[in-house]
Amino acid sequence: MKSVFKFLVLILIVSSCAKDEPLTPDEKTIICESDRYVEQIFTDTEILTVKYGSNINTLGLNQDLLMDVYQPVGDTLKKRPVVVLAFGGSFITGDRKQLADLAKEIAKLGYVTACIDYRLLSFAQWPIDSIKGFDIAIKASGDMKAAIRHLRKDAATTNTFRIDPDMIIAGGVSAGAITAIQASYFDITDNTEAHVKATVDKNGGIEGNSGDAENLKYSSKVQGVLNLSGAIYRPYFMDAGEAPIISLHGDKDDVVPYGYDFVKPLGIPILKLYGSSEIHKQAQKVGVRSTFITVKDGGHENIYSEAKFAAEFNSFKQSAYSFNKEIICK
């Protein structure tokens, strides 16, 4: 009976949030004690595709940068947390549609979810070397930052998506996770190595240049990171006080290293990165909240696709939803 009462109160509060008044502390408490953000309280989603920026791609052509924004149908809550997701594909293949199922699942929990495109290398530019690999990762992270800024700009202007600009979580799979991690933790204080600085400067600086002047007025800071088989270029990019992170990685991953090793798209070593186990160590060292789940004997892709790992992946998703809710409701 108590749970039914809470659900009815939640419905009343969600309806009242369509007005201009912000949530009171009591209203937030009731929402955070409900199943919202950890259970699918909505049955359907709607999708809107928007352009969040543009830039010159690796072939020298102008590329519009798009994202699909998923919202729960029937939700009237005034301010919703948003999860920004980037797909995988070794920075040479893939598109924003790859994570559509995950985006819908998250939106049904009560989030807004945005699946972004970002710039890639073409197969004509294969093989990738360390210079090309680092450059495209910087381009991709700059694109993600522009997407995050676009959502904050929307919240401050047309408010199309009714997001909470103070609760943005960045995430991705494989190359998308590498993109999200660099976008979340690499800042001006980390831009000290000569070759890093040269590449960053060539791509418009720390924030990149994928958004217009108005877009660049907004912050790209995130409040949480969702890491699925990703890595970081340097552990020291993560500093005390930065966004908490939850990670999943197979300990037999032969593409993106579990520890410190070469990233190997199509089996070819490109450059050394620090995988999720090393990210977790750095988080513990500097006091950043981190949850790290290892999939024993898991590879790079099979932990998401093979039936024998399905229970572990589903368990991780529930852990991630609880992790994110704790961030939201702190």
Image: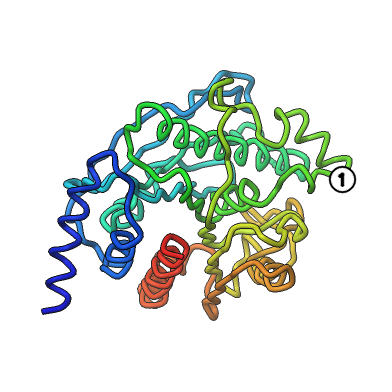
Q: Residue 262's x, y, as percent?
A: 73, 59
Image quadrant in which the N terminus is located: bottom left
In this rendering, would 37 be left or right of 277? left
Q: Residue 214's x, y, as percent?
A: 54, 22
Name the residue located 36 percent from the left edge and 38 percent from the top edge: 68
Name the residue located 30 percent from the left edge and 52 percent from the top edge: 107
In this rendering, would 271 be left or right of 72? right
Q: Residue 287's x, y, as percent?
A: 68, 70
Which residue is situated farthest in the right direction here? 194
Name the residue beneath numbered marker 1: 193
Q: Residue 123's x, y, as percent?
A: 59, 36
**Which quadrant of the view contains residue 187?**
top right
Where 54 falls versus 77 (above or below)?
above
Name the residue located 23 percent from the left edge and 40 percent from the top edge: 19
Residue toward you, 255 or 320 = 320
Residue toward you, 65 or 106 = 106
Name the residue located 66 percent from the left edge and 52 percent from the top edge: 185
| Amino acid under disc 1 | Glu
Label 1: few (<14), some (14–19) or many (≥20) C-alpha neighbours in 10 Å: few
Q: Secondary structure at mark 1?
A: loop
Where 4 falls versus 53 (above or below)?
below
**Which quadrant of the view contains residue 232?**
bottom right
Residue toward you, 66 or 84 = 84
Where 42 falls versus 39 (above or below)?
above
Q: Is residue 123 at all visible to an observer of this figure?
A: no
